[in-house]
Image: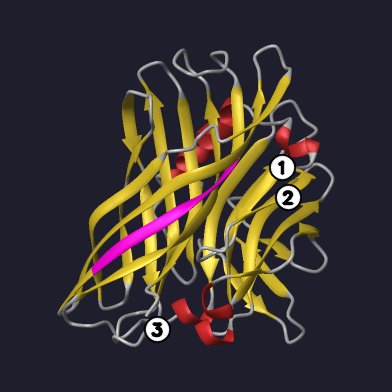
Amino acid sequence: MGVVVQAVGGGGIASNTATTPDAIKQSIDDQTNEIARAAAVAEPTYGSVSQLSGTSPNSHADVSRSDDGVYLISLPSAGGSNISLNTDENLYSSLPEIVIIDGVAVRPMVLYKDNGDSATFAGVYTGDIDNLGNWLAGGYWLHGTDLIGVQPDFEMGAFIDGPEIEDDPDLPTGGSAEYSGEATGIYVGIAGTDHEYASGSNILGEYTGDFIATANFENGGGTLNGEVIITESFDYIILVDSSTVETTNLVEGVRISWSDVRFTENGQATGDVSVSIPGLDLVENEGKTGNKFSTETDSEGNPRLLAGTHGGSIRSAGGTEAGYIGVHIGVTGE
């Protein structure tokens, strides 16, 4: 499966031709779809903004950056011990830096860690962006255990972290701000009778898209409206006869949106989402989003950055199911 990672803030899509390790993609099954849907409806947690399947003693991801620029990522695991990755030892593939807003660059990369019968795959982007709060790191992960057994187990989630979204912001007491940026994530699904692939086929994909949001501030908090629109995807399908298909843009046009999500002076906006998919009659449609405003402000006195996670879980009238989990970031441009 080719990895598609989109840089933040309008820099365009960068496509990586390296494949996700076979141990992970060939183990995708109905249980993996259930895990994706569980992550999509999970309550986001803060420290970083994290959203994940299962429970963990430490329920949010944590990222730090060493003096020599290596990002150290600790991901929560339902197994009781955190999953540790870093951008030096676990670098699977990477792309050149992409210049985004105001000359800031981010680096898309794929991290992979194999411990024999377990493996972790993560699509991550990082930025040494001193004028946007020193650095920012976020992405999504898929962790499999007992991969050589009859029934592997999976966990997945999404996270975004950085100094600028760690502390509570000083929010305006009125007015509004518009945010625009980009999103990236992973999804797992099962084709139903209304899908273009044979009913029962398992699907794994990564997506990128646009993110837009409006924050309406008031004394003590306010409301947030946001939407992720998927514009491109790379998809891996395991057909019912065990043959495989690789394709692109299978989920183009999917919209994950939220309206009037309340936030208080801590700058955290957690709420429900709705999902719409062109051509599908959805009978189940739910999900969660977690968002955090930055502590730094733009020229108008509004938080200059909004970052978070989003998830969507769907089932159609024809039995198609899918869970989407990813991250988004937007800036005011002021």
Pointer 3 or 2: first along the chain: 2
Please tell me how crowded label 2 is: few (under 14), some (14-19), or many (20+) other residues with Cα within 10 Å.
Answer: some
Q: Give the label, 3 or 2, closer to the camera.
A: 2
The answer to whether residue 37 is above or below residue 109 is above
Prevalent SS, magenta region: strand
Q: CA distance from mark 3 to mark 2?
A: 33 Å
Q: Quadrant of residue 72?
A: bottom right
Pointer 1 or 2: first along the chain: 1
Asked if the residue at tag 2 contacts the one at tag 1, i.e. Cβ–Cβ closer than 8 Å, the answer is yes
Q: Is residue 289 magenta?
A: no
Report whether 69 appears left or right of 46: right
At label 2, which amino acid type do we have? Asn
Q: CA distance from mark 1 to mark 3?
A: 36 Å
The answer to whether residue 281 is above or below residue 227 is above
**Image quadrant occupied by the N terminus:** top right
Q: Which residue is mark 2?
A: 16
Pointer 1 or 3: first along the chain: 1
The answer to whether residue 183 is above or below residue 175 is above
Report whether 119 appears left or right of 37: right
Regarding residue 292, the answer to whether it shows in the image is yes
Q: Please state the horizontal and vertical placement of residue 334, each as a whole percent of the image.
A: 37, 80
Region of the chain picked out in magenta, as a range: 206-215
Regarding residue 146, the answer to whether it shows in the image is no
Tag 1 secondary structure: strand
At label 1, which amino acid type do we have? Gly
Which numbered circle lies on residue 295? 3
Which numbered circle lies on residue 2? 1
